């Protein structure tokens, strides 16, 4: 199937196509498993990814551990509602929601609402503006791990999580759409914007 | 941002192309567009450079030791001593969840075919997977010329990990492996290189329906198929038919299994 690139929408709640849902008839046979076994099968294999996402969202290892532990508990309580979709995306969406609740409670100043983000996107301008054709290698090759980490941490959370899930964790667009609970079109637009913003920051640093 | 701008879409498609998210037809048209529009080609270069930088500078770290144990104790799952590894107990669920992941991972599987596949359908699926892999940034999900790396990579991704042999001395070095999907079954594909050509070798659980017939080439891609030990192997490549036969022969007679 082809991806139909969806237009990025300004409104967060615009009906942007059908909700992304993975339907794979008969693929998940979890009927015979008790909750613990199901948890071990669905959640435990993805703890590393969960930890890394939490760490990028909280920007702190200790907080990330708390978030993952809390998210795992939520996942365990909700394990019966796991409907046989993609287990990694399912867990990561719980981790993400847990991280945002945690941030709202502990660091309210860092939370950027989606409305603010849309303002940021507008301010940032259209995708097709500017950008010369200078090869990037000369400009960002000297960037070290710390600069790169700091530049990613500076991205607004919705951009950051999309970039992290794709370019660090290697999720595909469908999984990202499921994990971040937005349409694929939004994933595409956020990803392109995240990469451009990141490149821009790195050029100034580098 | 309400007025649609086709240029925005082109940019998003370049990103999707680099992420291996496009089907062959769209990938081809984006590749053509990039070759005609320097701005898009430059965008692609920048993104690739950024991805390389992220890959080189930010290795993925594991969760701290002890986190898993704390999680398990907090939900009260206790590990009982077992005679068999835990994955054996849940292999069905595991296989099923992997099937889901694999279905998500491979674009070609959005084309769902019935459980009764004829050889020609299987061949077409595998040729599509092969073409798609050539257009993706990487033709494989695990890159390694070492069969001791590639074979274990399949463990935990598909129910039966494939036979992986080293044919480097015969000028078919191993490139790596990926999971393809035939119908709804995730299957192992090994990728070997012959000069500048790639050979995709897919191991499909043998089925009587696959036993006879099937095309020897589709759209210029040659196909060689054989069955051994309950597994049907499909080799797909644009190397000459004769060379592909040689490859099949080498693979069949090679005994250096893990």
Image (cartoon, rainbow, N blue to C red):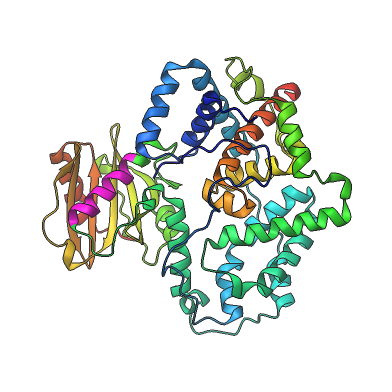
Q: Is residue A85 above or below residue B165?
A: below
Residue A43 in picture, x, y percent from top left? 61, 67
User: Residue at 53% across / 51% down in the picture?
Assistant: A18
User: Quarter of the image containing the C terminus of chain B?
Assistant: bottom left
The residue stretch that appears in magenta: B119-131
What is the quadrant of residue A121 in the picture? Answer: top right
Residue at point 45% right, 22% down?
B34
Q: Residue B234 placed where, x, y %? A: 23, 52
**Height in image: A171 above or below A129?**
below
Q: Position of residue B177 (x, y in %)?
A: 39, 50
Relative to B66, B231 lies left or right = left
Q: Does the stretch in magenta take in B220? A: no
Main secondary structure along the magenta-highlighted residues: helix
Residue B26, compared with residue B85, is above or below; it is above
Q: Residue furthest left?
A: B213
Answer left or right for A65 relative to B250: right
Q: In the image, is B211 to the left or to the right of B235?
A: left
- Can the viewer see residue A147 in this picture? no
Residue A15 in sight here? yes
Q: Is residue B24 above or below residue A48?
A: above
Q: Quadrant of residue A151?
A: top right
Which quadrant of the figure has residue B103?
bottom left
Residue at (61, 79) in percent of width and height: A36
Quarter in which the N terminus of chain B is drawn = top right
Verify whether residue B123 appears in magenta: yes
Along the viewing direction, whichever of B173 and B128 lies nearer the viewer: B128
**Residue B52: x percent and y percent?**
57, 33
**Image label count:** 0
């Amino acid at each position: 199937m082809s991806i139909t690139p969806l237009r990025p929408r300004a409104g967060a709640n615009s009906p942007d196509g059908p909700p992304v849902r993975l339907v794979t008839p008969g693929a998940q046979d979890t009927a015979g498993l008790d909750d613990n076994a199901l948890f071990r099968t669905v959640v435990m294999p993805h703890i590393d990814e969960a930890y890394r996402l939490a760490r990028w969202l909280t920007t702190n290892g200790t907080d990330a551990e708390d978030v993952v532990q809390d998210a795992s508990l939520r996942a365990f309580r909700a394990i019966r509602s796991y409907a046989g979709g993609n287990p990694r995306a399912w867990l990561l969406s719980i981790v993400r929601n847990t991280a945002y609740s945690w941030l709202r409670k502990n660091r309210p100043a860092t939370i950027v609402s989606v409305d603010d983000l849309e303002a940021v996107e507008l301010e940032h301008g259209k995708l097709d503006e500017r950008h010369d054709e200078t090869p990037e290698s000369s400009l960002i090759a000297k960037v070290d791990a710390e600069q790169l980490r700091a530049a990613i941490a500076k991205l607004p959370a919705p951009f950051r999580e999309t970039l992290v899930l794709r370019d660090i964790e290697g999720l595909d667009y469908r999984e990202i759409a499921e994990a971040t609970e937005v349409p694929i079109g939004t994933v595409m637009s956020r990803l392109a914007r995240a990469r451009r913003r990141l490149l821009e920051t790195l050029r100034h640093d580098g | 941002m309400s007025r649609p701008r086709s240029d925005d879409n082109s940019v998003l498609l370049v990103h999707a192309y680099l992420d291996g998210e496009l089907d062959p037809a769209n990938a081809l048209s984006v590749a053509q567009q990039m070759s005609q529009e320097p701005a898009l080609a430059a965008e692609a270069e920048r993104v690739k450079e950024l991805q390389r930088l992220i890959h080189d500078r930010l290795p993925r770290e594991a969760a701290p030791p002890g986190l898993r144990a704390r999680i398990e104790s907090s939900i009260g799952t206790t590990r009982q001593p077992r005679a068999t590894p835990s994955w054996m107990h849940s292999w069905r669920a595991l296989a099923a969840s992997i099937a889901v992941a694999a279905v998500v991972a491979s674009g070609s599987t959005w084309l769902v075919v019935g459980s009764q596949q004829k050889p020609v359908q299987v061949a077409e699926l595998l040729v599509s997977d092969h073409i798609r892999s050539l257009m993706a940034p990487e033709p494989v999900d695990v890159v390694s010329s070492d069969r001791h790396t590639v074979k274990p990579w399949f463990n935990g991704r598909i129910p039966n990990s494939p036979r992986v042999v080293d044919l480097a001395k015969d000028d078919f070095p191993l490139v790596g492996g990926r999971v393809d999907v035939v119908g709804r079954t995730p299957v192992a594909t090994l990728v070997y290189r012959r000069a500048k050509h790639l050979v995709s070798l897919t191991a499909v659980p043998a089925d009587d329906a696959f036993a006879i017939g099937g095309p020897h080439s589709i759209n210029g891609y040659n196909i060689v198929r054989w069955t051994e030990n309950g597994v049907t192997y499909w080799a797909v490549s644009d190397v000459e038919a004769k060379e592909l036969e040689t490859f099949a022969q080498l693979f069949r007679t090679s005994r250096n299994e893990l």
